[in-house]
Image: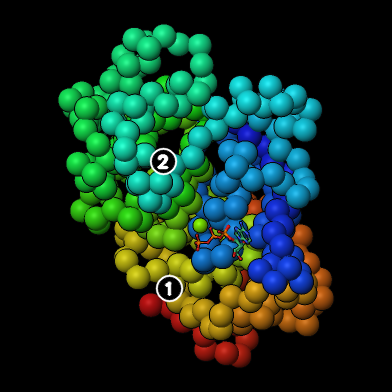
Amino acid sequence: MTRPVVSVRDLVVRFPSLDGSSEVRAVDGVSFDIRPGETFGVIGESGSGKSTVGRTLVGLLAPTSGTMAFGDRDRAAMTRAEWRTERRHYQMIFQDPNAALNPRMTILDSLTEPMRIAGGRSKADMQDTALAALEKVGLRRDMAQRYPHELSGGQKQRVNIARVLPLSPRLIVCDEVVAALDVSIRGEILNLFKELQDDLGVAYAFIAHDISVVAQISDRIAVTYLGQFVELGPTEGIIDDPLHPYTVALLSAEPQPLPTHLRHRRRMTLEGDIPSPANPPSGCRFHTRCPWATPDCASLEPEWRELKPDHRVACHHATEKGMPPLPVRESVSSD
Ligand SMILES: Nc1ncnc2c1ncn2[C@@H]1O[C@H](COP(=O)(O)OP(=O)(O)OP(=O)(O)O)[C@@H](O)[C@H]1O
Ligand SMILES: [Mg+2]
């Protein structure tokens, strides 16, 4: 099998809580590989640690513990200079199209900035490369002379994509990149991501609340809950035959209808608020909201089991056929 673009093992990222009295376990023991040229989707409720995973992947945050290998190199074994060179290939695009654009810089200057920081290119080369990147994302070259406020949100997001292309990215972390855009242009931007991937072979970590967006673009999907992955598998498997009760609940809560071939039959409502990541429940973290929970679920942490090919789940009760029928309560019904 080809070597992953990035391999993450037992990743933990903790932050001091606001009053400093405890720690927020934003990411608490996550392991996964991102394969070359794939789209690795990440879904989960607000605060489940999706952005923290993404920021750690591109070196904006340092792991509290765990290992990360980029290509065949262990991050911990790289010198600072080696990491500076390597991390250029791991880029991030944010929800806010303005986040990476300086309002006082022309689009051309914003496009050449990452190349200037990387060094080693002439001014003419950087400008040519920037203009070519602009065309690649579907914008005219004369846009280069404009300022960010003269562009629409969708155009700015295209510029943000163009900014990272000259760095030969192996992985782009896309954190809610279409969430701030008008619904009518989300599809265009998603198509652009797909076209660039076909062309350049770049992998994406695609983080979003909107499951239908993630399902449209992802090869595999990881489902996060309170800083952990509860399920990871091929998109069709996750959407059509989810193994974890939390995934079942997320799909049921989906307001926008999923494409028919991706629609899930079972309904389940998610009750209660997401617990605090500063003080997560014992055993299986989902047990406080899970209709299938038994006493074991409160005391034993479930193992990460591969129940179907390439499809893993952390749940004591999951079977390869999904969840067994609920014995008493009526929380699940079939359409
Ligand atoms: N820099 C920080 N300092 C302190 N706590 C943080 C920091 N960044 C994130 N957190 C906390 O870590 C947890 C996970 O946050 P994260 O932003 O990764 O979640 P998310 O899944 O991306 O949420 P959303 O869907 O709202 O973007 C949250 O409880 C958050 O408050
Ligand atoms: Mg986030």
Q: Quadrant of residue 261?
A: bottom left
Q: Earlier in the sequence, mark 1 or mark 2?
A: 2
Which residue is at a point 58% across and 75% down the rendered structure image? 274
Q: Quadrant of residue 102?
A: top left
Q: Which residue is mark 2?
A: 100
- Quadrant location, the C terminus: bottom left
Which residue is at a point 81% across and 71% down the rendered structure image? 300
Residue 189 vs residue 169: left or right? left
Badge 2 element? loop
The answer to which of 74 and 218 lies nearer the viewer is: 74
Residue 183: % across, % down: 25, 56
- Check the image and name the residue furthest to the front: 104
Q: Which residue is mark 1?
A: 253
Disc 1 from disc 2: Cα separation = 33 Å
Which residue is at a point 60% across and 29% down the rendered structure image? 87
| Three-letter residue code for mark 1 | Ala
Which residue is at a point 35% across and 46% down the rendered structure image? 98
Ligand 1 closer than 8 Å to the CB at disc 1? no
Q: Are marks 1 and 2 in contact (CB under 8 Å)?
A: no
| Three-letter residue code for mark 2 | Ala
Q: Nearer the viewer, mark 1 or mark 2?
A: 2
Residue 95 vs residue 286: left or right? left
The answer to which of 91 and 252 lies nearer the viewer is: 91
Residue 84 visible to an observer of this rendering = yes
Q: Is residue 250 above or below residue 138?
A: below
Answer few, some or many: residues within 10 Å of disc 1's Cα (few below 14, many 20 plus, some between 14 and 19). some
- Quadrant location, the N terminus: top right
The answer to which of 252 and 109 lies nearer the viewer is: 109
